[in-house]
Amino acid sequence: MPGIWTRHPRYAILVAIALLSSLYLLLPYSAPTGGIYTLRDSTLPARVQRSIAIYDKLLKDRQGLIKKFGPNPKDIALFPPDTAPWPPYTVWDFFPAAFNCPHEVERLGALGDGGKWVCGLSRVAQKEDCVVYSFGINLESSFESEILQGTNYCEIWGYDFSVKSFGPEIPTSRAHRTHFRPVGLAGADKHGPSDDPPMYTLQTLMKENGHKHIDILKIDIEGWEFETLTTLIKPYIESGEPLPFSQLQLEIHIWNKSFEDFLGWWEMLEGAGLRPFWTEPNLVYLNYNKQGTPDLAEFSFLNVKGSHNVFLQDPKSVHPHAPAVH
């Protein structure tokens, strides 16, 4: 063997180069000087802080975009008309889902209308007190069914005054973990004898159910999300208390809104700690409304405030048979 190295120095050099290249590629990557992270720093708190830094940059970029096409929010159209100079944006470009979920992201439920994007379902797979609320059923419960399938203890409270039960996707074997009421979600309680349909605030329903925190909250209430979430969120912002839910799946219907109004409402969500990690335009709606504008979009948010968010903080205790989380 030594003879090969002495007789073929070029071969020896090539082998050395190959070995050094392999070692370099196997070393963990470090960001250039001034970068905000390295792959060595992969703990959950580090991933969350990295996501916060990325989103903070987005906030600055949004202000720059407003100045470019405004310069004030009142000067910006949600969907610019098809005339020169054809500014290359729609309202949704100002609000990208720039927060990084620090776990797996998966679409639960039907492909097409009905499914939602969820961050880290594995984090509640063994959580014994896992609570899910779902507003807006419309006889399609594939989303709720997959949550039940992917977890051992999550219970789902569903509400929709337009139907009488969950959809047929809920299997009988898991129906004992579901609870349904034909009522609606609103910004004020209106459920007296003459109120039809009966409407409840989220706080009232949580109190009746004995819940202090919701892990996953789905809301699809056909445009009423603006009034409902405004009424829900403002007291928490004023008191400094965190919102009572960890993750929110929300369909936004931007009908009859101005950019200025929507910006103010969205900034209220951000002020309460909500950060979007996924978005999906509702192209089903656009397909049947070809002469209209893309007014509907699905957003998924994580709540970065508070100490009860199992998606952003390691739980204090888990089921004894649950696998370790990282």
Image (tube, grey):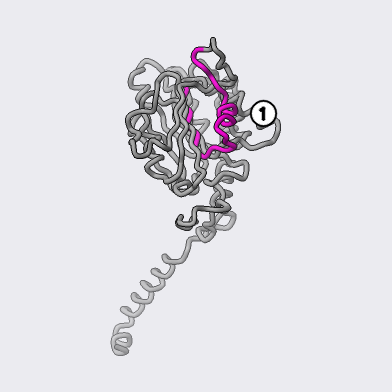
Name the element at disc 1. Answer: helix
The residue that appears at 48% across and 17% down in the rendered structure is 255
Image height of 194 relative to 36, above or below: above
148 with respect to 195 (left or right)? left
- Looking at the picture, tell me which residue is in the foreground, 57 or 263: 263
Give the farthest residue toward the right: 239
Q: Position of residue 63 (x, y in %)?
A: 60, 32
- Amino acid carrying mark 1 in the image: Pro
The residue that appears at 33% across and 33% down in the rendered structure is 169
Taking the magenta stretch, the answer to whether it contains residue 158 is no
- Write down the region rendered in magenta: 196-221
- Looking at the picture, tell me which residue is in the foreground, 228 or 54: 228
Is residue 34 something that shows in the picture?
yes
| Quarter assignment of residue 230 | top right
The residue that appears at 41% across and 72% down in the rendered structure is 20
Quarter of the image for the N terminus: give it.
bottom left
- Looking at the picture, tell me which residue is in the foreground, 33 or 324: 324
Give the farthest residue toward the top: 194
Image height of 249 relative to 32, above or below: above
Image height of 188 relative to 145, above or below: above
Q: Where is residue 227 in the image (x, y as percent from the top left)?
A: 57, 20
Instruction: Classify 10 Å Cα crowding around label 1: few (below 14), some (14-19), many (20 and above).
Output: few
Q: Where is residue 297 in the image (x, y as percent from the top left)?
A: 44, 28
| Quarter assignment of residue 204 | top right
Where does label 1 land, which residue? 235
Is residue 68 something that shows in the picture?
no
Taking the magenta stretch, the answer to whether it contains residue 200 is yes
53 with respect to 296 (left or right)? right
The residue that appears at 33% across and 36% down in the rendered structure is 171
